[in-house]
Image (cartoon, rainbow, N blue to C red):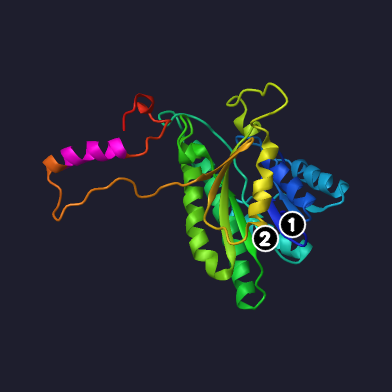
Amino acid sequence: MSDANDRVVIVTGAGGGIGRFHALDLAAHGAAVVVNDMGVARDGSGASESMAEQVAAEIRALGGRAVADTHDVSSMTGAEALVNRAIDEFGRLDTLVNNAGIIRDRTVTNMTEDEWDDVIRVHLKGTFAPTHHAANHWRAEHRAGRARPWCIVNTTSTSGLLGNIGQANYGAAKAGIASFTVITAMELHRYGVRVNAVSPGARTRMTEGLIDDAEGAFDPFDPAAISPFVTWLGTDASGDVTGQVVGVTGGTVTVLEGWRPGPSESREHLFTDEEVAEVMPKLLEQAYVNPRLPGADSGQG
């Protein structure tokens, strides 16, 4: 059983959707939660302090501990202030859940520079900045002999891992977060920090218009499905698990394996043009085919 008692957790983008469920689930398991959300629309426009406060108030009404925070996590100063907020309010930080994000979907031929920059900034830098400040705090704690089992849970997407038309900016950011997860798991292991990621498939305002409404009692895109896995990864229940990406959609969970060496062939010399033309079709025929790529349904490599 996941037990978050005595843990202090930050959840970014927790004012609605999946992030709200993460905050509620962690609080239900005993965590003190810093509910971070600027209250922007799904495209990043506007701002409202009420979204974060509403979720924090909901947790407190259920007997939990929570405070609202509206710092911009895609800013280094905002992310630092967020980490300090957790320490000032609850005495320390144990788990960081990086979930904040926006979408500005458009094909690459029509995408503007701002649509690219803003999505990359909020998702990718908005994961890096809080991680940077949390990791520096934990490194100092570790060196001072106050080590605890610390955790980071990032949010990636199949748009980045498998691809999705119209989301080159979002997918690039999410693919970057998956790689960032693996690399930071390697780097922070020495300080006792575990880093993992979830890839959610869920119905939220971020996926409005992309996922059809559910029919029947079981909703395969229920956003509440993701949070138990975040809580598990963000507590001692997951043991030594680190550097993993877990896909969750409704009643299905998948360990996503990502880039790994596939079919290969070697020579004791540099490949000639003729050998390239011979070897490549053979290797591609043996290789995994991304089902979302053109030609995949016809069996082409």
Q: Which residues are magenta?
A: 276-286
Rendering coords of residue 96 (x, y %) = 65, 56
Residue 138 vs residue 257: left or right? right
On the image, numbered disc 1 is attached to which residue?
Answer: 3
Whether label 1 touches label 2, CB < 8 Å: yes
Total numbered badges shown on the rendered structure: 2
Residue 5 vs residue 256: left or right? right
Rendering coords of residue 3 (x, y %) = 74, 57
Identified by mark 1, the residue type is Asp
Residues 59 and 245: in front is 245
Could you tell me which residue is drawn at 23 percent across and 38 percent down?
282
Local packing at callout 2 (Cα closer than 10 Å; few below 14, some 14-19, many 20+) is: some
Above or below: residue 219 compared with residue 97? above
State which quadrant residue 144 falls in.
Answer: bottom right
Residues 161 and 84: in front is 161
Label 2: element kind: helix
State which quadrant residue 91 falls in.
Answer: bottom right
On the image, numbered disc 2 is attached to which residue?
Answer: 236
Identified by mark 2, the residue type is Asp
Residue 188 vs residue 273: left or right? right
The prevailing secondary structure element of the residues shown in magenta is: helix
Rendering coords of residue 279 (x, y %) = 20, 41
Local packing at callout 1 (Cα closer than 10 Å; few below 14, some 14-19, many 20+) is: some
